Amino acid sequence: MSTGTLCVHDSRTGVKYDIPIRRNAIRALDLQRIRAPSAGSDRADQVSLGIRVHDPGLQNTAVLWDSDFEDMFYLLVWGTYPIVHQRTELSRALAVHMREVPDEVFNAIRGLPMQGQLHLSAITDSGGSRGLSGFEVKYSKRKLFGYGHRSYKGIDPRVRPIRLILQDLNEPSPLLKLAEAIEEAASTDEYFILSRLYPNADFNGNFVFTGIGIETEMIPAAMISQRIMGIMAHWREYMGKGPESASR
């Protein structure tokens, strides 16, 4: 249960406080009601805003209840969280610019190969755990997408939370069991072990998209949409450092 009440007993004054809990978090401003004894000699006790929360680096602080594309876009570009009218104006500007995208951009997108089903078709074409072997993958007799990563040379840390999401799906894809069989076979295959090849986020991540109703042909669009914020972060960093800085 993520909502309720946090009961606080201040041993300094004997006063009890009820702090509302929403989505497993409390508002820092609600702590302002907790005041130190007025007779204290420590100047830190005499601040007008009540007790403070010390959290260097925001290691355990949630700064937003909810956020969406416009909020994160504005934050990454202008460095502050938008107020209501700023968010509204940004939404309008984005809508206008989307209508003014040059035809060359649409034509370029239409000309791109649709690779949304690569991971899923690789699973269906593999023939299950019996059809997969290190020999077949090593000598390109079969393609296995979703294994290995240029940055993660060991187990991809994104895999575990993705698997937790898959457990929450009411109707997981029937191919998920096949993917699990492939992963089990690869985990004991000498070629995969010696090559340190592990499933990456894409191997199981596509089942999240299909599990929430996204067609396989639309997976590229869904994947790029979730990466836009990271792309904007790289763009902001690049623009701040100048053209001599490395970027990817």
Image: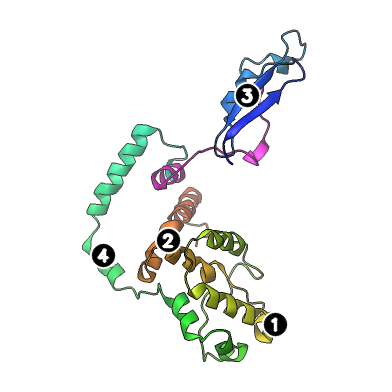
Indicate whether residue 89 is drawn in magenta: no
**Extreme residue in the top direction:** 39
The disc placed on residue 212 is: 2
Q: Earlier in the sequence, mark 2 or mark 1?
A: 1
The reply, left or right, for residue 116 in relation to residue 9 is: left
The disc placed on residue 194 is: 1
70 is higher (above) or lower (below) than 104? above
Q: Residues within 10 Å of mark 2 (few under 14, many from 20)?
A: few
Q: Nearer the viewer, mark 1 or mark 4?
A: 1
Q: Position of residue 229 (x, y in %)?
A: 45, 52
Q: Say whether marks 2 and 4 touch (CB < 8 Å).
A: no
Q: Nearer the viewer, residue 125 or 60?
A: 125
209 is higher (above) or lower (below) than 122? above
Task: Give the residue type that dot 4 points to.
Answer: Phe
Residue where numbered disc 3 is placed: 18
| Image: magenta residue range | 51-76
Q: Residues within 10 Å of mark 4 (few under 14, many from 20)?
A: few
Q: Mark 2 to mark 1: distance in Å?
A: 36 Å
Q: Nearer the viewer, mark 2 or mark 1?
A: 2
Residue where numbered disc 4 is placed: 106
